[in-house]
Image (cartoon, rainbow, N blue to C red):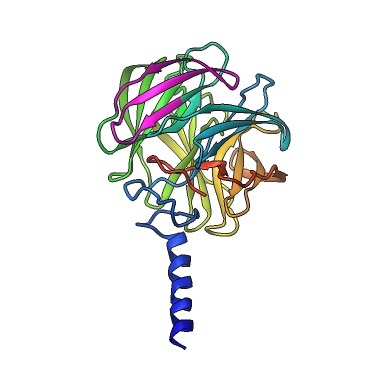
């Protein structure tokens, strides 16, 4: 009887640990510890790597630190290629065309030294690199987008202690300016940056994992000018909103959903903040591969 009670308690403790570690979601095996310093939840990197105008998935293998690109046509996996392996201590924080050569590049972040770096890519091949600015304590990069409309990607930073966001205006790997952005509400994290209302300004896509609720914060530069709730994600702590991109080519950003326990993905097609259709996406393979990343130097699932 005691053994059965102990087994029941152990299973209960493991179940609780999967859902809460210092208030942060962790659906990974227990050996993968989520960073207690980060209040941001899993996000994924989705962009057009092969120049066909269609967003692709970026995968990561937590065991080998290998990256891989899955080329997509809307929700269909049409090919793939291995990408560069990340050095120990460095995590992938974003992807954008920093040197404006028409190819997306990796933004890397070292959580121990707070150093950043850019890895310049030609499709899936690293061709050069450069050091970026060092981040102040408490801040981490969580997204990229052109906020000052100079044609160059900027960095969105987040401070988990204050829930403050900030924008670092960049010229390639050089910071040329900075300003504070809006403070996020409790329980919400940034899952993507895209122009949802098509006014020429990137907006924040927010997600509350405890309720499944999503929201769009419409921005003009760094200023929040309006907000609207988006569709609610089903299966709290099961499905996650992890990225945004235009998958069906209608000029409107869509949601990428991810179920880390099975590797399943799904696309929710949106018109602004309204869910108009859905499609199953490809399933991420087992063996340490993941679609979603945890901020602060920890990969989820």
Q: Residue at x 64, y 29 (%)?
A: 55
In this rendered view, identify the residue nearer to me: 57 or 156. Answer: 57
In this rendered view, identify the residue nearer to me: 107 or 232. Answer: 107
- Is 127 situated left or right of 135 in this image? right
Residue 264 belongs to the span the image colors magenta = no
Residue 155 image point, x, y percent: 40, 26
Numbered circles on residues, count: 0
Q: Residue at x 35, y 20 (%)?
A: 132
* View extreme (left): residue: 137
Give the magenta range: 107-134
Relative to 122, say whether 137 is above or below.
below
In this rendered view, identify the residue nearer to me: 62 or 198. Answer: 62
Res. 35 visible in picture: yes
Residue 111 image point, x, y percent: 33, 36
Q: Main secondary structure of the magenta part?
A: strand
Residue 115 image point, x, y percent: 32, 27
Res. 201 visible in picture: no
Relative to 288, say whether 9 is above or below.
below
Q: Residue at x 48, y 71 (%)?
A: 11
Residue 118 belongs to the span the image colors magenta = yes
- Is 247 situated left or right of 60 in this image? right
- Is 76 situated left or right of 239 in this image? right
Q: Residue at x 52, y 53 (%)?
A: 213
Residue 261: image quadrant is bottom right
Residue 18 image point, x, y percent: 47, 60
* View extreme (bottom): residue: 1
* View extreme (top): residue: 101
Relative to 71, say whether 183 is above or below.
below
């Amino acid at each position: 009887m005691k053994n059965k009670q102990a087994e029941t308690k152990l299973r209960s403790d493991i179940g609780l640990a999967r859902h809460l570690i210092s208030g942060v979601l962790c659906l990974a095996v227990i050996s993968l510890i989520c960073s207690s310093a980060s209040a941001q939840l899993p996000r994924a990197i989705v962009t057009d790597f092969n120049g066909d105008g269609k967003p692709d998935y970026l995968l990561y293998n937590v065991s080998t630190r290998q990256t891989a690109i899955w080329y997509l046509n809307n929700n269909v996996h049409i090919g793939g290629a291995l990408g560069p392996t990340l050095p120990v201590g460095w995590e992938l924080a974003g992807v954008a065309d920093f040197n404006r050569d028409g190819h997306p590049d990796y933004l890397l972040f070292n959580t121990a030294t707070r150093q950043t770096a850019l890895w310049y890519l030609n499709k899936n091949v690293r061709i050069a690199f450069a050091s970026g600015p060092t981040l102040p304590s408490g801040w981490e990069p969580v997204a990229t987008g052109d906020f000052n409309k100079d044609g160059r990607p900027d960095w969105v930073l987040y401070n988990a202690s204050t829930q403050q966001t900030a924008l670092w205006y960049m010229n390639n790997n050089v910071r040329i300016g900075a300003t504070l952005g809006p403070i996020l509400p409790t329980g919400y994290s940034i899952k993507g940056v895209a122009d949802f209302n098509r006014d020429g300004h990137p907006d924040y896509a927010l997600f509350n994992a405890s309720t499944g609720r999503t929201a769009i914060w419409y921005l003009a530069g760094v200023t929040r000018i309006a907000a609207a709730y988006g569709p609610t994600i089903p299966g709290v702590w099961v499905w996650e909103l992890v990225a945004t991109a235009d998958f069906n080519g209608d000029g409107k950003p869509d949601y990428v959903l991810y179920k880390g326990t099975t590797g399943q993905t799904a696309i929710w097609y949106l018109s602004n903040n309204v869910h108009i259709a859905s499609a199953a996406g490809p399933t991420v393979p087992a063996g340490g591969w993941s679609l979603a990343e945890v901020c602060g130097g920890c990969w989820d699932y």
